[in-house]
Amino acid sequence: MRHLKKLTGPWRTVLNIGVTLIFGLIYYYFALPALNFQDPSLYTFVILLAAVFCLLSIATRGLLRQGKRGRELWIDIKKNCLWPVLLVAALIVVYLLGNLISAPIFRATAYRDLLTVNTGDFATDVKEVNFDQIPMLDKDSAQRLGDRKMGNLPDLVSQFEVADDYTQINYQGGPVRVTYLQYGDFFKWFNNRANGLPAYITVNMVTQEANVVRLSDLGLGGIKYSPSEYFFRKLDRHLRFAYPTFMFDPPTFEIDDSGVPYWICPRVVKTIGLFGGTDISGAVLCNAVTGQCQYYAKDDVPAWVDRVYLADLIVQQYNYHGKYIHGFWNSLFGQKDVTEAADGYNYLAMNDSVYMYAGVTSVTSDQSNLGFILCNQRTKECTFYSAPGAVESSAQASAEGVVQDQHYTATFPLLLNVADNPTYFMSLKDDSQLVKQYAMVNVAQYQIVATGATVADCQANYLKLLSTHNLASLDNSADLTISGTIAELRSAVIDGNTEVYLRLEGDSFYYVLSVKDNELAAVLNVGDTVSLLTTIAEGDLRPAMNLERTAVAP
């Protein structure tokens, strides 16, 4: 302190500024605030810098050691901290005014219009289900399969862990969940940092097949930019230094059509006042291997990207839309036509995009849905479909009631179009989280419940129930294309014609083919993979035609 007293006024100021800048650089390196007045963390950053500078000014001038008391000391402190205090005061005023002009009480219409909600016809817009494209797993089941697959690879499991963030995407025409690896700890990062993370995991939601994709097999190096990295390769820090003024939603992990891993980093903007109306203006695509970043405006994001608008943001914007449909005061008094998204959401693969599905319910009652919304997570195109019926939790309870003696639990429903009927589809899992059966529940009449050991069984049973309730014509709605591996094969001569009876793996019934109608039926073998066009029939026999053999057993 004696040496500090020897410093003249200008040198003390230089010292104070230098120490403040060093503190600011360290804080910025770890906290990573956006240099953007719409980011509240910037205000915290600047206020901290002002406080540090002020405290240094007091310390280096020895004001607290000079024996001054009361008003005289206060005058000296104000004199030395005038500009920092004025800066902090100005920021507080800006922050308070920014929140005030962003408040829904003044801008209810702007909040309502954050999301444009169209009205559609479900039977027309949503194609009828092809059951060999139905995702049979939820996120928890996919995670279990991925962890199990990773556990079979000792060279990886000893050094890396599987991230629990399984992103659902469309990959090569089907629904897939994909996740990345992360380092087990700092020392494992230190030993492997030169090569990066060597693989990622995909789980096919239809076939339930988990794969560890080694980047070396794709001719790529390891993933060197991820949330589990340290220092300048840590993803958040890499993005901040590349785009210091951008605010970001949490990045999601995706792979392009060639299997190259990317981080999709949505750019957040505030569109109402200074702090209100959170929306997305585009996305930064960061190559997870090279770290190369490219920003795309929201209308220019490549088609292979599935998630630009995260589900939580879409739900928030829909709730604004439903809450302020007739203005701010109506949301508090009267609540005419006020709606909100029901608890929970799921994803639907459609038109080579991922759509977020959420039920819509009245704020005055959460026992039934008025309908549901489907929102494209790349474009934010959102459509409301009127379909009064059970909320998702009621459908889950209804499905669990059918198998209550087996104590299965239902996954959160997936919305499907089955014979032009909005239908909840669920997997039924045992206590070990293994999928044992499947269930379909009619949205409008949730007492119509069908289950089956396979998806084909479940759908066939459901179509029969729809027919008995006059909700679908069995003859017109039951034509299905089925693919599978032959598990059992029999034949018989009936009225001079050879009939072939085949059972596919996972089914408990037989398909019937006539050799007269399709000569290929005569040369089938157990183990062949075939595609059939079949019509649902009562009992354990189902007529089939248009047989196609896609693989031949050796």
Image (cartoon, rainbow, N blue to C red):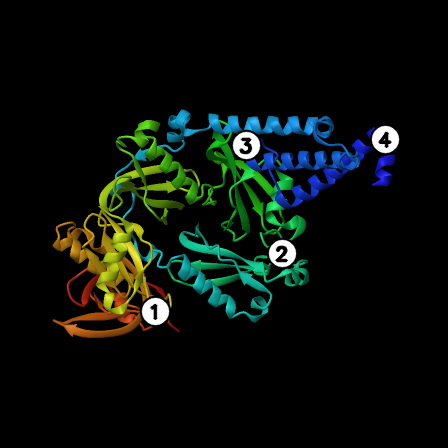
Q: Residue at x 63, y 57 (%)?
A: 196
Q: For marks 1 and 4, give the one nearer the viewer.
A: 4
| Count of residue discs | 4
496 horizontally vs 378: left or right: left
Numbered circle sitting on residue 221 = 2
Cα distance between the residues tagged 1 and 4: 91 Å
Q: For marks 1 and 3, give the one nearer the viewer.
A: 3
Question: For residue 371, what is the image quadrant?
Answer: top left
Q: Which comes before the other along the chain, label 2 or label 1?
A: 2
Q: Which comes before the other along the chain, label 1 or label 3?
A: 3
User: Where the C terminus falls, by quadrant?
Assistant: bottom left
Cα distance between the residues tagged 2 and 3: 37 Å
Q: Residue at x 79, y 36 (%)?
A: 62
Residue flagged by tag 2: what amino acid is it? Answer: Gly
Q: Residue at x 65, y 26 (%)?
A: 86
Numbered circle sitting on residue 528 = 1
Q: Which comes before the other along the chain, label 2 or label 3?
A: 3
Residue 415 visible, this angle: yes
User: Where the N terminus falls, by quadrant?
Assistant: top right
Residue flagged by tag 4: what amino acid is it? Answer: Thr
Q: Which comes before the other along the chain, label 4 or label 3?
A: 4
